[in-house]
């Protein structure tokens, strides 16, 4: 995984992580585990894998998707 993807804004399942706080380590849709940045501190670039996975009908965790 490149450094750009590691610093990218990731998408998370809202059912697995209903109320994350900045700094909480949670699992992104792409499988990466990163601290939750919060909406204001998110990196500018977006994880391309999360963009694709966020449009799925069912996430890997089994919860319904978008």
Image: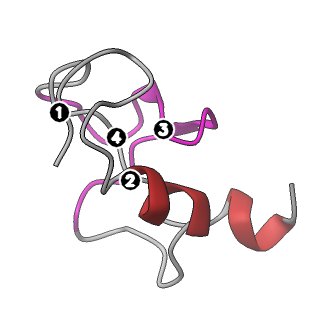
Q: Residues within 10 Å of mark 4 (few under 14, many from 20)?
A: many
Direction from residue 22 to residue 32 in the image, left or right: right
Q: Are marks 4 and 3 in contact (CB under 8 Å)?
A: yes
Direction from residue 12 to residue 49 in the image, left or right: right
Q: Quadrant of the N terminus?
A: bottom right
Q: Which residue is mark 4?
A: 12
Q: Which residue is mark 2?
A: 37
Q: Residue furthest front?
A: 57
Q: Residues within 10 Å of mark 3 (few under 14, many from 20)?
A: many
Give the Cα separation between the discs numbered 3 and 2.
Answer: 12 Å
Q: Residues within 10 Å of mark 1 (few under 14, many from 20)?
A: few
Pointer 3 or 1: first along the chain = 1
- Magenta-span inclusion, residue 44: no
Q: Which residue is mark 3?
A: 28
Q: Position of residue 5 (x, y in %)?
A: 71, 65
Q: Residues within 10 Å of mark 2 (few under 14, many from 20)?
A: some
């Amino acid at each position: 995984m490149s450094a750009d993807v590691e610093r990218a804004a990731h998408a998370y399942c809202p059912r697995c992580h209903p109320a994350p706080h900045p700094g909480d380590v949670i699992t992104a849709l792409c499988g990466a585990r990163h601290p939750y940045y919060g909406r204001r501190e998110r990196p500018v670039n977006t994880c391309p894998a999360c963009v694709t996975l966020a449009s799925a009908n069912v996430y890997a965790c089994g919860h319904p998707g978008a």
